[in-house]
Image (tube, grey):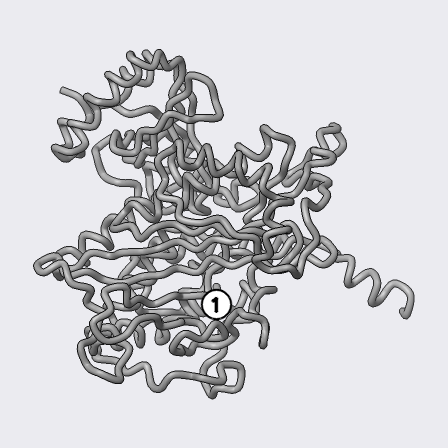
Amino acid sequence: MSFIKRHGLWSDEQHAAAKRLRQAVEEQKLEVIRLSFPDQHGILRGKTLVASEALASLENGCTITTTMLAKDTSHRTVFPVFTSGGGFGMREMEGAADVLMVPDPTSFRVLPWSRATGWLLCDIYFADGRPVPFATRSLYKSVLEKLEKRGYEFVAGLEVECHIFRLEDARLSPEDAGQPGQPPSVSLLSQGYQYLTEQRYDQMEPVLEIVRRDILALGLPLRSIEVEFGPSQCEFTFKPMAGLEPADTMILFRSAVKQICHRHGYHATFMCRPRLPNVFASGWHLHQSLISIASGDNAFMTKQEGEVLSPFGRQYLAGLLEHACASTVFTTPTINGYKRYRSYSLAPDRAIWGRDNRGVMVRVLGGPDDPSTRLENRIGEPAANPYLYMASQILSGLDGMDRALDPGRSADTPYEAQAKRLPKTLAEAVAALKDDRFFRDTLGAGFIDYYVHIKNAEIERFQAEVSDWEHREYFGIF
């Protein structure tokens, strides 16, 4: 009996998708299939198998080492994996032991930029069929199941900013290697400050056309491509998607854009604020609403004239504000991302909401009998792990509903409003999450301690580095 059948891991839909997958591999003469899982940072990791081996492992999984879950953003292992419990307090994680990557056949894609190559997104399990507790896709699925039991479906639209540069030097000399290595040297594709002008779009169109073609060939629901305010900056938006799909889309989109661009001599980055002259910060705005499974209606939509949200929507909104500081680690997980939180900068600096106002944290769009009513949370950075970002939103919103919280009045002057400030650094955000009882209860103390440990390792490396700022500030005067 296969691993899948023994533990009942696939739905009828997944079994049907597996049959179609096998046919597609044969008909399209695919030679290899990449098996990938999203790690704690939202980075795809995995193995490439020849097609016959990939099909053979479809229902039994493919082994991968648990140290993939022990790494910070420099890919350094930050847990003592060869001690008792492997630093995780779990015997299954000791000694760089293996777990199984189990493909989700509904995620199957043929990669348009890589010849005869298929791709599958995987979940990771222990040998006894239990999901690995640090696997963020599984964590998000458990949150969606809780939401479904309450009779709702999560709907999200992605609005993602990034930079695309011309790659001048990939820095592949041995002396440039490191952990991490030296970043590539790049040049601009356009100057900035001509937001949405056709001339600037046309300058970037050669690479944007390549990206658009392959993203659509993947079957991702791309809606628009825009040039943003800063040099070489652009934005991609996607149609609303439900449940697991928006997070899976973000994972594949981000990885695909980087691969496509690199193959054509460009460098794409979802880093929030690259250290390049005149470059602007990028954000990830998450549009969200809940749909009643029973009626199909938007639960945030109001029928009350003069109101922008239903009572349910207001309570959900209040939950987002209530837990904004502790959830910031999930929405903005890098040290660099906090350079974006500046007053009067089209980015939030405090936990407030406003009606169609781009200076607030949560921008409310819609009105009476408007089925597109939604909340646009503008707090996130493009490097966020989408499974953690979206899970934190749902849990926070539902807590607002359970406690009948009130979000207060719309903040029409957002940078002058009296409200709690968002964390100014990753260290502040990690401290807020570490002590937060709500996320310890909803995501589990084990996961919170695990994630805090990884983020603290990143912070400690940063604090040990001597920056250019310090050298300029002190080297001459003292």
Name the image quarter holding residue 435: bottom left
Side (left or right) of 259 relative to 442: right
**Residue 403 location in percent, x, y?**
21, 78
The secondary element bearing badge 1 is classed as helix
**Residue 459 location in percent, x, y?**
58, 57
**Residue 320 location in percent, x, y?**
34, 71
Is residue 335 something one can see in this rendering? Answer: no
Q: Does 148 appear above or below 216?
A: below
Name the image quarter holding residue 181: top right
Q: Does 478 appear above or below 385?
A: below
Q: Residue at x 39, y 53 (%)?
A: 158
Q: Residues within 10 Å of mark 1 (few under 14, many from 20)?
A: some
Q: On the rendered image, what quadrant is the N terminus found in?
A: top left
Q: On the rendered image, what quadrant is the C terminus found in?
A: bottom right
Q: Residue at x 53, y 82 (%)?
A: 415
Query: What residue occupies the far left of the structure in this picture?
Result: 294
| Residue with the mark numbered 1 | 431
Name the image quarter holding residue 110: top left
Q: Residue at x 35, y 43 (%)?
A: 221
Q: Nearer the viewer, residue 327 or 386?
A: 386
Inspect the image, locate mark 1, and give the three-letter code of the amino acid beneath it. Answer: Ala
Is residue 57 something one can see in this rendering? Answer: yes
Q: Residue at x 35, y 29 (%)?
A: 109
